[in-house]
Image: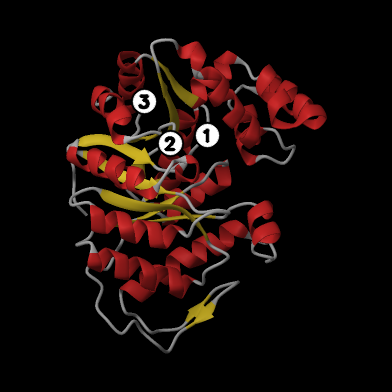
Amino acid sequence: MTSNSVPLGLNLGIWDRMSNWQDTVEIARLADELGYSTLSLPESFGRDGVTLCDRLLAATENINVCLGIANVFSRSPAVLASTAATLDELSGGRFILGLGGSTPNLIEGWHGLEFSAPLQRTRETIDICHKIWARDKSPYEGEIFKTGGVKLTFTPLRESIPIWQGAVLDKGIATCADKADGWIPSSLPRESIEHGLGIINETCSANGRNASEISVAPTFQLAAHDDADQLLPLVKFGIAMYYGAANSPYAKAAIGLGYGDEVQELQAAYVNGGAPAAAEVCSEQLARSVALVGSVAECQQQIRDILAAGASQVMVTLPAGTRAECEPILAGIRP
């Protein structure tokens, strides 16, 4: 994997609302030129993430590209492993495989599959990926998957392609510390970094693993503007979408971090009026913890603080725009 000098990443998670793909490519190239470490592209109900990662890897030169996050239900471990090995080979070692257990809404409502044992499925998927990249054809006997007898027909560029896990709750973070190479949480309060690092350190200590080997790359909405009040409604609406449902893992995590009253009020409003109503009651304290809000200089300082708290890099999500609009922001926030 290449190692750019700036501990920043750019999440292109809102391309569905951008005007065209060429704008996205130009913004990705800008991040590459500015020395950003990583681009990430999510995958849910929209465009295919693998195809877009391939296009971005072809359009850039040095920056790593993470499929963040692919669910562990809709593709088999073998498909995920061979896809990752292919993209990694074609890009000269710049691909990161992001994995997560996802949600019932996506797995059952979109894919029509049973949402069952997401953490065990994640653990076994990671194990099988490592076996495939090592071209090990010995049997694998898991609770969910049983494989063996065949091996990958080509030798991967790297035997251990980085796997980043998008864990939100404590058990998922512990699984990440046990199995993965990186933790890439999103839409969580800033306090989650210290909390998650505590779980990672404890798990690694118990398992004899060096916690410093695990990349910590939290994702934050970037609301950089001299008049922050203009962008706070956008931030609050995003929080309402992620936190409003009663079974939201993001809301559960935030409650554990001391935002119980704020989440309770938000969810009550969501029941009666959906995301617009929940956004109206979303507290400014929660919004400013889940997002980077303020002038470019203030956002830069917030990034410094997050890095000082233990993050390896900070992933930022920009509102839709063009390269010209993004350049002063992406250049200005570099720590």
Mark 2–mark 3 Cα distance, whole angstroms, equals: 11 Å
CB-based contact (under 8 Å), mark 2 and mark 3:
no
Q: Return the mark for residue 187.
A: 1
- Please identify the quadrant where the N terminus is shown: bottom left
Residue at image position (74%, 21%) is: 265
Are there few (<14), some (14-19), or many (20+) residues within 10 Å of tag 2? many
Comparing 195 with 267, the one in front is: 267
Q: Is residue 149 visible?
A: yes
Mark 1 vs mark 3, foreground winner is 1
- The percent coordinates of residue 302 (x first, y second) are 36, 19
Mark 1–mark 3 Cα distance, whole angstroms, equals: 14 Å
Mark 2 vs mark 3, foreground winner is 2
Comparing 149 with 219, the one in front is: 219
Residue at image position (26%, 73%) is: 156
Q: Secondary structure at mark 1?
A: loop
First in residue order: circle 1 vs circle 3: 1
Q: Residue under label 2, please give it.
A: 219
First in residue order: circle 2 vs circle 3: 2
Residue at image position (38%, 49%) is: 21
Left or right: 245, with 16 as reference point = right
Q: Residue under label 3, please give it.
A: 306
Are there few (<14), some (14-19), or many (20+) residues within 10 Å of tag 1? many
Q: Secondary structure at mark 3?
A: helix
Q: Is residue 214 visible?
A: no
Q: Give the colour scheme of this rendering.
A: secondary structure
Left or right: 178, with 105 as reference point = left
Amino acid carrying mark 3 in the image: Ile
Q: Is residue 324 above or below residue 215?
A: above
- The percent coordinates of residue 74 (x first, y second) are 56, 66
